[in-house]
Image: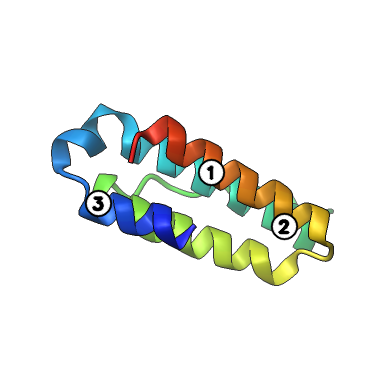
Amino acid sequence: MDHFADRLRAAPQSRLQRGAAAEALQLARELAHRAQIIEAPDVRPRVMPDAGMFAAADQITVAAHDLALVLTDESQVEEAVGLVAEAQQRAGV
């Protein structure tokens, strides 16, 4: 995840506009959703807001760290790592 975030921070604005930032936001929202479901299964999850393309790297960093704090087994960690790898590939960074 840190590698993906670093690549986003280094990416030119044109790459972010072509979809890398949108892919990162989608990933951040998914990771945040998963963390909220684990932390408070009876509470409706909130949607992470779109803070702009230049904040996308920070949003995935925060969401991934929040999720890492609540995961309870190795299979959940592996699944989250897979989500990050797939999003990075789709983002092209």
Q: Is residue 77 left or right of residue 32?
A: right
Q: What secondary structure is marked by label 1?
A: helix
Q: Which mark is residue 33?
A: none
Residue 69 vertical placement versus 1 (above, below): below
Q: What secondary structure is marked by label 3?
A: helix
Q: Which x, y percent locates residue 22?
A: 37, 35
Colour approach in the figure: rainbow
Q: Which x, y percent locates residue 74?
A: 80, 60
- What whole-number distance in Å separates the C-alpha atoms at marks 1 and 2? 12 Å
- Report which residue position mark 2 lands on: 77
Residue at 60% x, 66% y is 66
- Report which residue position mark 1 lands on: 85
Q: In which image quadrant can residue 35 be found?
A: bottom right
What's under tag 2, amino acid-wise?
Val
Q: What secondary structure is marked by label 2?
A: helix
The label nearer to you, 3 versus 1, is: 1
Residue 31 vertical placement versus 23 (above, below): below
C-beta proximity under 8 Å, tags 2 and 3: no
Q: Nearer the viewer, residue 71 or 34?
A: 71
- What whole-number distance in Å separates the C-alpha atoms at marks 2 and 3? 27 Å
- Report which residue position mark 3 lands on: 54
Q: Is residue 17 left or right of residue 77?
A: left
Q: Earlier in the sequence, mark 1 or mark 2?
A: 2
